[in-house]
């Protein structure tokens, strides 16, 4: 992570704040660098917003709320319709920025934006999800109905690994429901997020409805404690997400925290061998393992343990290079700090006695000698007490465990502290059905390595991967970003009055 350093007068793009409809340069004297992970070139500067700036963003959102919640639903939906068109048309340009600041390959950067775009597309049609319910004549001449209403100023805090998709999980659905929003993007790669925000404003989001502040813990803590913020959506690590959940909840806010992962892929011997091995390699090492749904643990059941040499052979073929170079499979990891953490954990695995079948630590990328590269790395002989199994490595490292039965595999997965994603590879419907029923993990893939649900469903998670009842996007997030009110109503006609009644009605 870039430490905050004084703002020098460098001729570099700066991440602007968005306050009250205006993109403004921060007055902060604390700034960080946005660094290209393949080259170490500083490509931009990001401010750590001041207390006054965060206050101004929240105040703007609070002021804008009344008019925006009273803006007809159709008008709000049409802003999203324009936004989705602008995102689609600018996807390639934004993907280039995303690759430069985050490192992932260009096609993967486009995928990052595209998966967010799908949420925007869904946001264009969520009118039906905002409808209330009606029950006629619940008592003599009395009807009861619910209104689903926006809650006010909502805040979003996003991680570095999906600067396109995850901000788009949040603000489009929040504002289409009639709320206003304050977004705090990752300070490590805010530039592509800001390009998306610019398009939202071009699409007609009114001043104050969407605001952006940059920064780290201080800004996040302000969002979690400010009395005018009603709800917080967080995506990031378990450590920070738990802090955000606890602090926000203590201050009376709705909070949803989507957090860390250790995603297992369970391989039964009857699985389609080539399809499975290809899926494992793609899901383990794509995006340099920096996906919250990356396969980081492979569990070989019974005779599928014989597939291990082929898994290693396939991983060896992946091309490690800068993300913008054609044909790259694995780009650099996010930062020098991430590189040090990942290589440190690999060393811990070696010291703990796991077998390092493929070591990506000394990979050399000609022309990008300063890049934060770690090549595909595979451990076998891993036991559940080793730190390479208990910790989220968040790099291109796959650890392999072997068990004898599906029951043992299920028990292993369910004992892990995380429960974000899991995959089962098999040709047996009975095994798949048992697995989906007994596994305690939010996203389950059957012969699908990265089972991120499309936006009509919602993302979820178990145990250390999620706090809060309702997940991002889909039906659940409409519930998260709205509150229901029940109205019980009776309209009098000319029937004579019944007189005073002091008891609870018996219906
Ligand atoms: P992170 O937790 O370090 O940062 C997330 C956000 O919190 C950033 O905006 C950051 O500025 C802020 N932050 C950092 N430290 C803070 C602190 N001490 N107090 C308050 N705020 C703080 O996460 P990251 O490294 O950016 O992202 C990687 C993590 O995100 C991984 O654990 C990954 O599994 C997780 N992730 C989860 C999902 C999901 O849906 N479950 C999706 C993507 C990423």
Image (cartoon, rainbow, N blue to C red):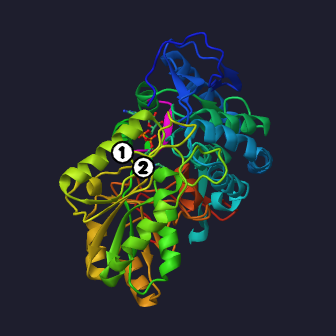
The picture places residue 473, in percent across and down from the top left corner, at 57, 55
Residue 505 against residue 25 in the figure, above or below:
below
Q: Position of residue 101 (x, y in %)?
A: 59, 36
Q: In this view, does 11 lie to the left or right of 453?
A: right
Q: Nearer the viewer, residue 152 or 183?
A: 183
* x 64%, y 51%: residue: 116
Q: Name the residue under label 2.
A: 395
Residue 360: x and y in percent read: 40, 51
- Is 232 inside the magenta-drawn segment? yes
From this viewpoint, is residue 440 visible? no
Closest to the observer, 48 or 128: 48
Element on which disc 1 rests: helix
Q: Quadrant of residue 430?
A: bottom left
Q: In which quarter of the image is ligand 1?
A: top left
Residue 256: assigned label: none
Q: In the rendered image, which quarter contains the N terminus?
A: top left
Which image quadrant is residue 67 in? top right
User: In the rendering, at what x and y percent does residue 255 appear?
Assistant: 44, 45
Query: From which residue to which does the magenta span run?
Result: 226-238
Please say if the residues under marks 2 and 1 sit with CB atoms less than 8 Å apart. Answer: yes
Give the alpha-carbon distance from disc 2 to disc 1, as whole Å: 6 Å
Where disc 2 sits, the SS reads loop
Q: Which sits in the foreground, 333 or 408?
A: 333
What residue is drawn where x is 33% and y is 58%? 418
Q: Residue 342 carries which label?
A: 1
Residue 487 visible in the snapshot: yes
Residue drawn at point x = 35 percent, y = 36 percent: 247
The 10 Å Cα crowd at callout 1, few under 14, some 14 to 19, many 20 or more, is many
Residue positioned 75% across, 38% down in the render: 199
For disc 2, the neighbor class at 10 Å (few under 14, some 14 to 19, many from 20) is many
């Amino acid at each position: 992570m870039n430490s905050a350093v004084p703002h020098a007068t460098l001729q570099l793009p700066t991440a602007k704040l968005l306050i009250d409809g205006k993109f403004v340069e921060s007055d902060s004297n604390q700034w960080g660098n946005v660094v290209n992970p393949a080259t170490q070139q500083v490509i931009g500067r990001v401010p750590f917003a001041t207390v006054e700036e965060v206050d101004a963003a929240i105040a703007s959102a609070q002021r804008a709320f009344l008019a925006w919640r009273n803006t007809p639903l159709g008008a709000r939906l049409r802003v999203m319709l324009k936004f989705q068109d602008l995102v689609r048309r600018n996807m390639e340009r934004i993907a280039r920025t995303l690759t430069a600041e985050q490192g992932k390959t260009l096609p993967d950067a486009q995928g990052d934006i595209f998966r967010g775009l799908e949420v925007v597309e869904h946001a264009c049609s969520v009118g039906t999800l905002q409808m209330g319910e009606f029950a006629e004549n619940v008592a003599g001449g009395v009807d009861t109905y619910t209104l689903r209403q926006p809650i006010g100023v909502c805040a979003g805090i996003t991680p570095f690994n999906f600067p396109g998709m995850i901000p788009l999980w949040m603000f489009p659905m929040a504002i289409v429901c009639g709320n206003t929003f304050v977004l705090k993007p990752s300070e490590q790669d805010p530039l592509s997020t800001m390009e998306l925000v610019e398009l939202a404003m071009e699409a007609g989001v009114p001043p104050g409805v969407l605001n952006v502040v940059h920064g780290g813990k201080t800004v996040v803590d302000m969002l979690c404690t400010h009395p005018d913020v009603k709800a917080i959506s967080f995506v990031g690590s378990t450590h920070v997400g738990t802090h955000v959940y606890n602090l926000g909840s203590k201050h009376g806010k709705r909070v949803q925290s989507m957090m860390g992962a250790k995603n297992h892929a369970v391989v039964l011997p009857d699985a389609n061998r080539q399809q499975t091995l290809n899926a494992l390699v793609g899901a383990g090492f794509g995006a340099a393992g920096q996906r919250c749904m990356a396969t980081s643990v492979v569990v070989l059941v019974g005779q599928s343990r014989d597939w291990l040499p082929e898994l290693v052979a396939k991983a060896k073929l992946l091309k490690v290079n800068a993300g913008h170079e054609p044909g790259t499979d694995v780009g650099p990891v996010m930062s020098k700090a991430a590189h040090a953490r990942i290589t440190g954990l690999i060393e811990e695995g070696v010291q703990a006695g796991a077998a390092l079948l493929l070591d990506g630590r000394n990979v050399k990328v000609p022309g990008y000698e300063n890049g934060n590269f770690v090549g595909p790395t595979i451990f076998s002989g891993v036991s559940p007490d080793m730190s390479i199994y208990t910790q989220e490595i968040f790099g291109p490292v796959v650890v392999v465990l072997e068990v004898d039965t599906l029951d043992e595999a299920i028990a292993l997965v369910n004992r892990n502290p995380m429960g974000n994603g899991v995959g089962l590879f098999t040709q047996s419907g009975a095994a798949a059905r048992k697995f989906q029923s007994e596994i305690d993990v939010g996203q389950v893939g059957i012969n699908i390595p990265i089972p991120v649900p499309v936006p009509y469903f919602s993302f979820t998670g178990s145990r250390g991967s999620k706090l809060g009842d309702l997940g991002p996007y889909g039906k659940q997030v409409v519930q998260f970003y709205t509150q229901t009110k029940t109205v019980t109503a009776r309209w009098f006609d000319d029937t004579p009055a019944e007189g005073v009644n002091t008891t609870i009605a018996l219906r």
